[in-house]
Amino acid sequence: MRTSTALKWVSGGLEAFFGIPFVGGAIILSTGWAPLFPMAILHIITLVFCVRDRDGKVGSILGIITSCLGWIPLLGMCLHIITAVVLLVSAYFESRRSAHR
């Protein structure tokens, strides 16, 4: 498995966790939106590896946008969920594609 694919699985899973209504929101709010900055860094690192591996970049770019706008309560939750789906679907198809090579 390529590094970019593994990072997509990790960042997608974290985005899915933060997108859980009440649970993810409570953690984000109780920590003063602190998880948004490390998530932005993770998405930037994932994007760098995606460029290097020539993988899809949409999920990582969407993740960076989500980290910038995630402080808006309802919008943040929706963006976390959408980003999680895009990242996890992308990681799934890249895993399948590399398994068939």
Image (spheres, helix red, strand yellow):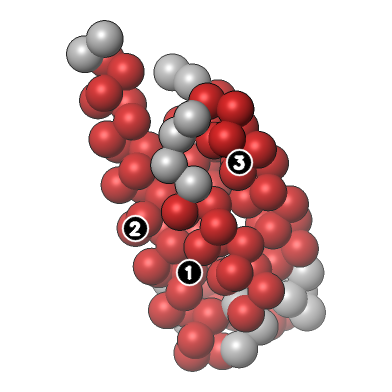
In the foreground, 55 or 34? 55
The residue type indicated by label 1 comes to His
- Residue for point 36% across, 55% down: 86
In the foreground, 67 or 33? 67
Check the picture and name the quadrant holding the C terminus: top left
Residue 48, above or below 88 = above
Crowding near pointer 3: few (<14 within 10 Å), some, many (20+)?
Answer: many
Give left or right: position of 85 versus 65: left
The numbered mark at residue 100 is none
Residue 14 seen anywhere in this rendered image of the structure: no
Residue holding disc 2: 85
Residue 40 seen anywhere in this rendered image of the structure: yes
In the picture, residue 99 is in which quadrant? top left
The numbered mark at residue 80 is 1
- Residue for point 45% across, 34% down: 55
Q: Residue furthest left?
A: 100
Crowding near pointer 1: few (<14 within 10 Å), some, many (20+)?
Answer: many
The residue type indicated by label 3 comes to Thr
Alpha carbon distance from label 1 to label 3? 16 Å
